[in-house]
Amino acid sequence: MIVFASRTGNVRSVVSKLGVESIEISEGLLLDESYLLITYTDGLGDVPEKVTRFLEQNKEFCKGVVVSGNSNFGHTVFGGAGEKIAATYDVPLVRKLDLRGYQADYDAIQMFYEMRVLG
Ligand SMILES: Cc1cc2nc3c(=O)[nH]c(=O)nc-3n(C[C@H](O)[C@H](O)[C@H](O)COP(=O)(O)O)c2cc1C
């Protein structure tokens, strides 16, 4: 399962290219299976609030995080949400995407998904 948050459509587009079962974060979502989290970055390198609320209720099943950001924000905050989630919940930061990313990103995400989420 891929769980995602998308505000302006970039993450949604990435998820659609992966061809994997997915669900968008909504208030009160509770999961009972392993998942890969894909989120955008908000503020100045911040985790979107709805993602934080989701993780607080579902952290035990999170196997890794993929983050989308915009490298124009500068390297200190680019994709900062992914770094914070990886550190706080002790999960791997699988990939940092600039906006919608590239084919090489999708290949790496799919490989991680098969080995560490399904596997
Ligand atoms: C208000 C706002 C703040 C943002 N802050 C950051 C940031 O600190 N670091 C970063 O890498 N990207 C930042 N972004 C860029 C988004 O994370 C990026 O465009 C992402 O691809 C959006 O994904 P989405 O289209 O699925 O919502 C920000 C975007 C907005 C609108």
Image (spheres, rainbow, N blue to C red):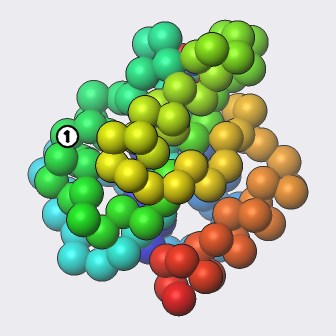
Q: Nearer the viewer, residue 14 or 60?
A: 60
Residue 48 point in image, percent of width and height: 36, 29
- Badge 1 crowding class, 10 Å Cα cut-off, few under 14, some 14 to 19, many 20 or more, is some
Q: Is residue 9 visible?
A: no
Above or below, comparing residue 117 to residue 41 in the picture: below
Q: Is mark 1 within 8 Å of ligand 1?
A: no
Question: Image quarter for residue 57?
Answer: bottom left
Question: Mark 1 is on which residue type?
Answer: Arg
Residue toward you, 56 or 8: 56
Residue at coordinates 71% horizontally, 74% vertically from top-left?
111
For residue 109, what is the image quadrant?
Answer: bottom right
Instruction: Residue 84: give x, y in percent of width and height.
Output: 43, 33
Apparent side of residue 32 relative to residue 85 in the rendered image (left or right): left
Q: Is residue 22 visible?
A: yes
To which residue does mark 1 refer? Answer: 53
Image quadrant of ligand 1?
Answer: top right
At x 67% / y 41%, what residue is drawn? 96
